Amino acid sequence: MSKKVLINVEDKDIRVAIMENGVLDQLFVEQLEEKTIVGNIYKGRVDSIVPGLQAVFVDIGMERNAFLHFADVSRTYILPGKTGFRPKPTPVPLDDEDDDVLDDEEATAENTNDELEGDDTESTVESPAASIPKPIKRHKPEPPKELKPGDEILVQATKEPMGTKGARITMYISLPGRYLVLLPFSGQTGGGVSRRIEDFSERRRLRNLLRSLKADEGSFIIRTAGLEQEESEIAHDVQKLTKTWARIRRSAAQRNAPALIHDDHDILGRLVRDELTESISEILIDSKHHGALLKQIVAATMPSFKDKVTICDDLDESLFEKYEVETQFQKALRRKVWLRSGGYIIIDETEALIAIDVNTGKFVGKGDQEATIFQTNLEAADAVTRQLRLRDIGGIIVVDFIDMKSRDNQNALVRKFKELLKHDRAKTTVTPLSEYGLLQMTRKRVRQSLAKTVFNQCPYCQGSGRLLSEQQIWKAIKYEVLAMLKAVPGTIKTLRISVHPIMRAYIEEQLLDAAKGLANFTGVALEFLEDKEFHFEHYEILKRD
């Protein structure tokens, strides 16, 4: 499996494409003037505490206050400015099934799929979720008695502001490195190892290594990238993270809230830290300036990759054009995605959930119907999981697979779907197929989807994708005319009705008899005028003097 990274730098944004055997697998876009805040650490000021919402609203210097859930308030944290306040750490009960722990790949405590696991027999971490103590989800978190409006606290952004909602933040701070993550407020000692590292002997080696690399405060988690790494590499990461945390503590003590204390890299830094693996054969970038920055980051973080970086600033066309990323990118964001067999999937992204429908389309197969449907569903499962990664879709997702009668085929489809999801860095949960062939799942939403990043809402239909039909607009005009005449009977002789040009043409071609009938019924002359500046659904009725 050969992967290539293509980085296209434009005037307003940077786009990173990860290609797998020539096929677009992942795409990241970051606006140069509006960088992501996920992973950033802020010194914020408590604005209000709302027990009804189980929320603390914190001013972190953005347009809207950030949202801090009661469950994300660290009870062991010393608040800046309260030198005498040091609550005694108390064991926090954990939900054995709570996988919402450290985000190994997204580098925040809230957003994880690189599930973590401590040493069941030797490590001081008692359970996979014990790396970050959090209340049991089924228990209602109590209001944080330690906090009050005006207090200054250190928090980390875990979700971007979306729509009318402010950023989501947590006090369970995590600092990701290349091979480790430092949890300074975990309330535990020891550490853990990513569940994705499955080899028993390697897990034991890494756990033994953790014992000799204890943090001054908190604990470490070994990321998937730490697999088979030498002790010196891990130790270097420990030293780097420890120094970063010390710098953050100093900066937090010196600055007043609200303030950005730690910027979790731009897209190039995150790319090197989170995405570069041995499967990457080449990294191409079409900007001399950003290419030099990238080489510096690679040299400091992954020296073995420095020869893989090539600056291509002398091309007649962009990298995305040369490697056909633009074409694949445009196809990827269409509502209908075709499968190689002739089937297709429909992806509808709504405010509440993502609905994905699977159809056989042109694929008729060569065997029985059940085999054809099963084959289409398997192909669709691969396309759906790839589209989830590529579009960075999050939230509740419902996939309507084609109904299958065979229980064995249903189970095989779900197993295949879960296997494909192992390539996804975002945290996912999947339920079995329902009796209606629906597969329900969730995917961790950290930032806006790719579609919302590259598309603006249509100003004409306000994002609905629909306009009123001419018949509905005519009915609205007719009933408004009747209401006006009823309000002042016998006083109006002529009404001038201005409409969009398409609507006026429709009235002349399709509704002329209906318009004449309305005029005869009311005894009022109706004049229809067109206004090119009008919205299609807009009309205006005025009395003519």
Image (cartoon, rainbow, N blue to C red):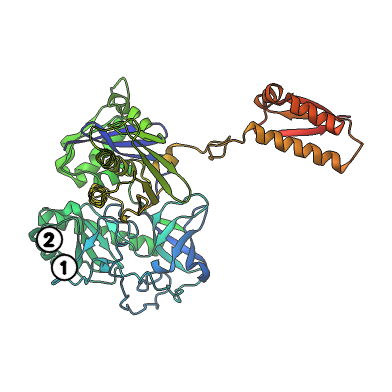
Task: Return the residue found at the far top.
Answer: 316
Q: Residue furthest right?
A: 490
User: What is the quadrant of residue 529 in the picture?
Assistant: top right
Residue 31 showing in the rendered view: no
Q: Position of residue 37 (x, y in %)?
A: 40, 51
Q: How many marks?
A: 2
Q: Nearer the viewer, residue 73 or 299?
A: 73
The quadrant the C terminus occupies is top right
x and y, in percent, of residue 341 in the image: 27, 32
Relative depth, front residue between 173 and 397: 397
Res. 58 mark: none
Residue 516: x and y in percent read: 79, 26
Counting other residues with Cα less than 10 Å from the Cα at mark 2, is it few (<14), some (14-19), or many (20 or more)?
many
Q: Nearer the viewer, residue 335 or 180?
A: 335
Residue 64 higher or lower than 459, as above or below:
below
Residue at x-position 75% and y-position 33%: 540
Is residue 483 toward the left or the right of residue 354 in the image?
A: right
- The secondary structure type at the circle numbered 1 is loop
Mark 1 Cα within 10 Å, few/some/many (few <14, many 20+)? many
As drawn, is 190 to the left or to the right of 441? left
* Marking on residue 203: 2
- In the image, is residue 513 above or below residue 372? above
Up the image or down, 25 lies above or below 233; here it is: above
> Is there CB contact under 8 Å for labels 1 and 2?
yes
Q: Earlier in the sequence, mark 1 or mark 2?
A: 1
The residue nearer to you, when weighing 489 against 455, is 489
Three-letter amino acid code at the position of disc 2: Arg
User: Could you tell me the amino acid type at mark 1?
Assistant: Asp
Whole-number angstrom distance, CA of label 1 to CA of label 2: 8 Å
From the image, tell me which residue sits under label 1.
119
